Image (tube, rainbow, N blue to C red):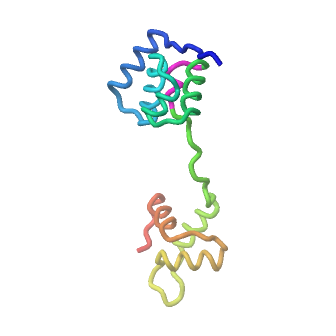
Amino acid sequence: MPKIEFKLKSKDRELLINLTKTGNRASREFERAYVLLALDKGKSHAEITEFYNVSRITIWRVKKKYLESGPEEAIKDEPRPGQPIKHDEKDNADIIAMVCSKAPEGRARWTLRLLEETLKEQNGITINRESIRLLLKKTNVSLG
């Protein structure tokens, strides 16, 4: 299979060179910029894989994205979905309502451990103490 020549436009090459010398970007963005510059110099995929420690698929994706959308899109990170939310607004409201209510008989106030156990027993909400603490901190509700 004949090798397809890859050349950057001069303004794109300058942009990538300036980007690699300055700026505050993620390391993956620098890596992609270097891959494009290496392809422009005529380096083979094997050489780029060996030198920059990236996979052939990464090289292929960066090249494809550059040809479709330009240099800025080729080096940019795609947004990541993150961990899904485990507790909805109703659960958060139940927790806050419980904290604002009177402490159980024989207790002076709510503790995180007591909240965790009571939520599990009464409401069926399984949540750990740290998540409760962060929710209360975010909503500015005090246990004391």
- In the rendered image, residue 66 lying in the magenta stretch gets the answer no
In the foreground, 141 or 65: 65
**Of 6 and 131, the residue lying toward us:** 6
Which residue is the extreme one toward the front?
A: 1
Q: Is residue 69 above or below residue 132?
A: above
Please tell me which residue is depicted at 59% across the width and 16% down the height of the picture.
3
Is 114 above or below relative to 52?
A: below
Percent position (x, y) of residue 117? 57, 79
Q: Residue furthest left?
A: 22
Q: Along the horizontal axis of the image, is 64 left or right of 111?
A: right
From this view, report whether residue 78 is shown above or below residue 88.
above
Q: What stretch is highlighted in magenta?
A: 69-76
Q: Residue placed at 64% from the left, 61% from the top?
A: 90
Query: In this rendering, would 97 be left or right of 34?
Result: right
In which quadrant of the rendered image does the N terminus lie?
Answer: top right
Quadrant in which the C terminus is drawn: bottom left
Query: What percent of the width, then of the height, locates residue 49?
Result: 49, 32
**Could you tell me what secondary structure mostly forms the magenta stretch?**
helix
Residue 23 location, x and y as percent? Answer: 35, 28
Is residue 35 rendered to the left or right of residue 63?
left
Picture quadrant of residue 143? bottom left
User: Is the residue 131 above or below the residue 84 in the image?
Assistant: below
Q: Nearer the viewer, residue 56 or 91?
A: 56
User: Quick one: which residue is furthest to the top in this view?
Assistant: 10
Q: Which residue is drawn at 49% across and 20% down?
A: 39
- Residue nearest the viewer, comparing 10 with 100: 10
